[in-house]
Image (spheres, rainbow, N blue to C red):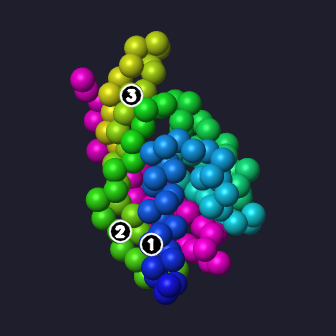
């Protein structure tokens, strides 16, 4: 299997694990020194422990979130993924439906994520019924 195919399989599995909310398997996809950043928070999370903290919070805030990928650009060890996150968010004990547009850039080495940078566009954040 080529490096490009390996990266494609890893990222497909990544989004499957996100949709399954499988935190343990998801964090195992990150290298111990992986750098994880997002426009949704300040600072950089590092490695599996950082991924655990980030996704634990995301799954807690929106336990039914689904990650819907619609475009992937794959350049062997760097992938750009465009997707929507849809679900219900508990705001003051009343569920609010949302749809948030995101784009993540993943760098892959030795079949592990070594860098992930995510941009969430709040202009495409839709609340509604």
Marking on residue 8: 1
Q: Main secondary structure of the magenta part?
A: strand
Helix, strand or loop at disc 3?
A: strand
Residue 37 appears in the figure: yes
Q: Residue at x 70, y 66 (%)?
A: 31
- Where does label 3 land, which residue? 88
Residue 123: tell me if it is visible: no
Cα separation between marks 1 and 3: 29 Å
Q: Please state which of the two labelled residues, at mark 1 or mark 3, is closer to the viewer.
A: 1
Residue at the far left in the pictured view? 129
| Cα distance between the residues tagged 2 and 1 | 9 Å
Residue at image point 36% right, 74% down: 73
Can you identify the residue that label 2 sits on?
72
**Residue 98 at x, y = what percent?**
33, 33
Q: Disc number at residue 28?
A: none
Label 1 SS: helix
Circle 2/circle 1 CB separation < 8 Å: yes
Relative to 5, residue 42 above or below: above
How many badges with numbers are in the image? 3
Q: Is residue 33 left or right of residue 20?
A: right
Residue 103 or 6: which is nearer the viewer? 6
User: What stretch of residues is rendered in magenta?
Assistant: 101-129
């Amino acid at each position: 299997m080529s490096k490009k195919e390996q990266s494609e399989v890893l990222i497909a599995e990544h989004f499957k694990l996100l949709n399954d909310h499988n935190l343990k398997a998801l964090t195992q996809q990150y290298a111990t020194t992986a750098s994880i950043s997002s426009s949704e928070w300040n600072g950089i999370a590092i490695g599996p422990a950082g991924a655990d903290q980030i996704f634990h919070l995301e799954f807690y805030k929106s336990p039914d979130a689904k990650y819907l990928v619609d475009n992937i650009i794959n350049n062997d060890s760097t992938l750009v993924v465009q997707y929507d996150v849809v679900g219900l968010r508990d705001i003051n004990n009343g569920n609010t439906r949302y749809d948030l547009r995101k784009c993540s850039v993943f760098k892959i080495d030795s079949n592990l994520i070594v860098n992930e940078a995510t941009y969430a566009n709040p202009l495409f954040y839709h609340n509604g019924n």
